[in-house]
Image (cartoon, rainbow, N blue to C red):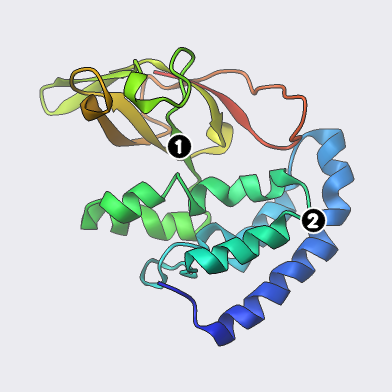
Amino acid sequence: MALDQESFDILLPTIQRFIRERLVPAENHLEEHDEVPADIIQDMKDMGLFGLTVPEEYGGIGLSVSQEVLVNYELGRTATAFRSVFGTNIGIGSQGILMDGTPEQKAEYLPKVASGELIMSFALTEPDAGTDAASLKTRADLDGDHYVLNGTKRYITNAPRAGAFTLMARTGGPGAGGVSSFILPANTPGIKLGKKDKKMGQRGTMTCDVIL
């Protein structure tokens, strides 16, 4: 999967100009208010940044890994919070669906991911396990035809603005083999969000606990 070179040669300078003319001048606002302005987020959606790595068949741009690296290199010229807004959509929040999701899941979620209508968040990290997936304690127990999840996730990027989570929970025994992945809509009953984390840096990025 890759965008044709002619189109990429148009896209990259467009992103460079957006960074130079829109993102860098907004860095002071970001630092003062600890938020990415809503109009900039809308511009990101209009440019297709939320779907950079989503295949074209689902409404994305379909960049290759090497093309994504070049785009990320340019985004590194400004505050990391800007990329963080759509970073989980083009990375860990959606790639599990792209690689292992059913055709129905791909059709339901990926077009919304690509347009920015849906912001995905990746919920792995826990208070006691960190990012060691083999040691996580959040459980998912089968109850009839559905699962009941209990646990806490920590430092979850974009959780305050997420519409759905790719969430890891233990369905079996100890170790990585007992862990399963769930697509969990953010409006699922029983989900609570902790207070937005106050960090020493990366102003404008959003992380918080997700409590099940």
Residue 67 located left or right of residue 148 = right
Task: Give the residue drawn at x 38%, y 57%.
Answer: 110
Residue 142: where, in percent of width, then height? Answer: 16, 22
Residue 34 located left or right of residue 123 = right
Distance in Å between CA atoms under marks 1 and 2: 25 Å
Three-letter code, disc 2: Leu
Task: Give the residue drawn at x 73%, y 37%.
Answer: 204
Residue 95 located left or right of residue 13 = left
Residue 124: where, in percent of width, then height? Answer: 42, 29
Q: Nearer the viewer, residue 95 or 18?
A: 95
Residue 79: where, in percent of width, then height? Answer: 77, 47
Task: Give the residue drawn at x 64%, y 58%.
Answer: 72
Helix or strand or loop: what does disc 2 sit on?
helix
**Which residue is at the far top?**
128
Task: Give the residue drawn at x 64%, y 33%.
Answer: 206
Q: Which residue is mark 2?
A: 23
Quadrant for the C terminus, please.
top left
Above/below status of 136 relative to 206: above
Few, some or many residues within 10 Å of mark 1 (<14, 14–19, 20+):
many
Q: Which residue is mark 1?
A: 122
Do the residues bearing badges 1 and 2 touch, measured as CB atoms within 8 Å? no
Residue 50 located left or right of residue 128 = right
Helix or strand or loop: what does disc 1 sit on?
strand
Quadrant for the N terminus, please.
bottom left
Few, some or many residues within 10 Å of mark 2 (<14, 14–19, 20+):
many
Q: Quadrant of residue 74?
A: bottom right
Mark 1 vs mark 2: which is more N-terminal? 2
